Amino acid sequence: MSQPSPKPQQIPVVVLAGFLGSGKTTLLNHLLHRSGGSRIGAIVNDFGAIEIDAMAVAGALGDSTVSLGNGCLCCAVDASELDQYLERLAEPSLGIDVIVIEASGLAEPQELVRMLLASEHPGVVCGGLVEVVDAAEFDDTRARHPEIDRHLALADLVVVNKLDRAEDGERVLRLVRSLVDRAAVVPATYGRIDPEFLFDCRPSEERIGQLSFDDLHADDLHSDDLHADDLHTDDLHTDDLHADHPHEDDPHEGGPRGHGHDPHDGQPHQHGADGHAGHLHAAYDSLSFVSREPLDPRRLMTFLDSRPEGLYRIKGYVDFGPYDVRNRYVVHAVGRFLRFYPEPWPGGDERLTQLVLIGSGIDASALDKELEECRSEAPHADEHGMWGVLRYVRDPEEDLVDPA
Ligand SMILES: Nc1nc2c(ncn2[C@@H]2O[C@H](COP(=O)(O)OP(=O)(O)OP(=O)(O)O)[C@@H](O)[C@H]2O)c(=O)[nH]1
């Protein structure tokens, strides 16, 4: 992308996009932990009503992040709302070096970049478009959504993720390289890329911690604590990266050419009739499910094992009550892929099951009803009840073989 060079005080804003479940949150979390001394401000846009991605990002840090849980950022949120968030994050006393916007998996990247370019905030500059690709699902995703090719052509950096799961990763890499315009193409598993691909990192001894929700809301910010003088404003220079540049001499001008929250539990969110028929999300519905009662693991597995083809993405947290009183289970389904990741319940929080389901051609009300039927108030766990779930528990690091 030919974006303007940042003025000394301008903070680059990187848009992190990619289809549902490709690994954007995983990559963002990796960046947050591996950014050395650089301070990242994150804006997370969840498609569903429950802010699962925002929680995942914030949870990893022990604090929070700015969340735009409002359907697709590309159309449900007007540009001024984004501007407000940018303004908050660009406040010099916060000492933010780079802002990353994690788009929803159904957002139109060119609209997001257009919004950014339209932002009149003098403190920020567009830092580029990063597209994450799920190498294992790439062929199927392209077959269903030919628009993906257009998204890749606009990107400045393409991360070909989940190479551990791809049957022939080299072929996918070659294919992606043939589809990008001038983007650097970087292979990855679990989003583990060098943060320098996105921004110039500060040495880690300068580390001052990532931005916390408290920082954003603090009435009196202590600029001394935040090293405001040390503002670092380098931009995304994909040209400097040690990756493939299929069209290095191409005087590519274009770059990005190019923008609902459903708070009712169990209510489908129809995106087809809102005048964005050409958008990726036009054919998708989302369903948010919250339960205070725990779910029965066997019933949930029956539900998951028979989930309809169109139900492409499920994510969230499950409370199995007496079956595991210590842990909640992070669940991710992406296509036919399914994983549970147990993690200790955060202290103090109410124990809830919170799920977001996203799919095309799904009957959201029927799915909601089926989930309702998974609730259980049984005070005791039966001995083998968790077996079905445990088949899908994996240490992410060992996540090499699909049990299905
Ligand atoms: N095997 C494997 N799994 C991965 C990799 N990267 C991410 N995952 C898993 O893929 C699932 C989805 O990852 P996320 O990072 O939540 O994907 P996302 O793009 O943020 O998802 P949406 O926001 O719903 O679009 C999770 O279960 C991740 O642990 C990878 O490189 N290999």
Image (spheres, rainbow, N blue to C red):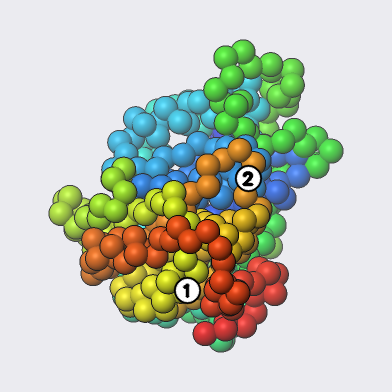
Q: Which residue appears at 34% of the width and 60% of the height? A: 372
> Label 2 crowding class (10 Å Cα cut-off): few <14, some 14-19, many 20+?
few
Q: Residue 318 at what x, y percent from top left?
A: 50, 58
Q: Residue 168 at what x, y percent from top left?
A: 56, 86
Residue 358 placement, left or right of 234: left
Q: Which residue is more in the foreground, 144 or 269?
A: 269
What number is the disc on residue 34? none
Whole-angstrom CA distance, mark 1 to mark 2, is: 24 Å
What number is the disc on residue 346? 2
- The answer to whether residue 259 is above or below residue 399 is above
Q: Which residue appears at 30% of the width and 36% of the height? A: 78
Which of the two labelled residues, at mark 1 and mark 2, occupies the earlier sequence position?
A: 1
**Which residue is situated farthest in the right direction here?**
205
Q: Which residue appears at 47% of the width and 66% of the height? A: 296
- The answer to whether residue 282 is above or below residue 351 is below
Picture quadrant of residue 219 = top right
Q: Which residue appears at 61% of the width and 25% of the height? A: 215
**Which residue is situated farthest in the top direction here?**
220
Q: Which residue is more in the foreground, 293 or 399?
A: 293
Which label sits in the foreground, 1 or 2?
1
The answer, for residue 359, to whether it is visible in the render is: no
Residue 276 placement, left or right of 29: left
Q: Residue 205 at what x, y percent from top left?
A: 84, 38
Q: Provide the secondary structure element on which disc 1 rests.
A: helix
**Which residue is situated farthest in the front direction here?**
379
Query: At label 2, which amino acid type do we have?
Result: Pro
What number is the disc on residue 298? 1
Query: At label 1, which amino acid type do we have?
Result: Arg
